Image (cartoon, rainbow, N blue to C red):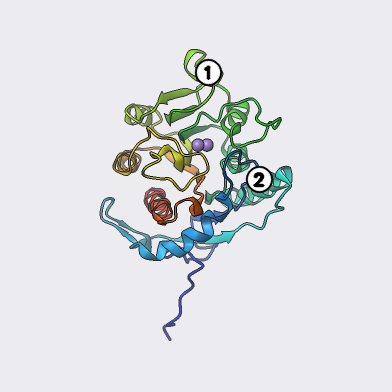
Amino acid sequence: MKSNFYHINTFMGMDKSYEESNLIVFGVGFDGTTSNRPGARFASSSMRKEFYGLETYSPFLDLDLEDYNICDYGDLEISVGDTEQVLKEIYDETASIVEDLKVPFMIGGEHLVTLAAFKAVYEKYNDVYVIHFDAHTDLREEYNNNKNSHATVIKRVWDIVGDDKIFQFGIRSGTREEFKFAIEQKHTYMEVGGINTFEKIINKLNGKNVYLTVDLDVLDASVFPGTGTPEPGGINYREFQDIFKIIKKSNINIVGCDIVELSPDYDTTGVSTVIACKVLRELCLIISSKFR
Ligand code: MN
Ligand code: MN
């Protein structure tokens, strides 16, 4: 008998079992090192509600969630207040997902969560390139006396992968030293403020394993005010759509992905949450379409 009930706590179109799915979506409601305005811990729960306003079909990509095996695994239970323990919990969970040869797709939370998920993916595949969208460099050595912070996360990723592996787009905020580290010293590739060189870089990464980390504050503050550290001068959603198209037709192998830093309650219109949902849908579709 067909059930007349549905679960509003599961992302629509992502209701397959863990076993049958290639793509595992999970939330991590952690915002313990957020420096400015906390609240990213509420991202995945508000997104699950809002997602019901979307269609499962993307006319832009001509792909439909219904055609793929995607599992919304729920939100990870974390030891709130203990950053190191939370990182371990994310690492362990992600490691078990990649061990099962599935692709982890994490919804933060603040950006520090990326460090633990990336580490697990890196240890599985070793040769992994990082594509990073953000308004912020996230290359500080430490912040508020913390080595592990959402302001240092990409520097910690660099500690793992070293030079020539990290590609940063949309960046428009950080210290002079951070920009020097990226641009003059070339420890990472960085495009300041925009995404014009994205297609060229993606073509270079043809056939490579890629971890994609999307800090949603890469979008302009007027487009996406629902975030802890909004920054003017960012890209609009249409430009982000172009990015999706480029990734879709590329030949990169996405082995892990996350979207972070939605802090839903700072945007009382709820539009930021809708945008985050749409980014989630498009990226899930693109990653899934590459399994075929
Ligand atoms: Mn960030
Ligand atoms: Mn940011």
> Residue 120's image quarter?
top right
SS assignment at label 1: helix
Q: State the residue in front, 79 or 92.
A: 79
Mark 2, ligand 1, within 8 Å: the answer is no
Q: Is residue 244 left or right of residue 74?
A: left
Identified by mark 1, the residue type is Arg
The residue labelled by disc 2 is: 32
Question: Dot 1 corresponds to which residue?
Answer: 176
In the figure, is residue 87 to the left or right of 44? right
Direction from residue 107 to residue 59 in the image, left or right: left
Identify the element where label 2 is drawn. loop
Q: Who is closer to the viewer here, 239 or 175?
A: 175
Q: Residues within 10 Å of mark 1 (few under 14, many from 20)?
A: few
The amino acid at mark 2 is Gly
Q: At 42% across and 37% down in the image, what residue appears?
A: 218
Task: Point out residue 119 in the picture as x, y percentages from the top left corner.
Answer: 62, 38
Residue 63 shows in this picture: yes
Sequence-first disc among 2 and 1: 2
Q: Position of residue 215 (x, y in %)?
A: 48, 40
Image coordinates of residue 141 in percent, x first then y, are 64, 25
Compared with 17, 139 (above or below) is: above
Marking on residue 272: none
Where residue 30 sits in the image (x, y, percent)? 62, 49
Instruction: Please identify the quadrant where the N terminus is shown.
Output: bottom left
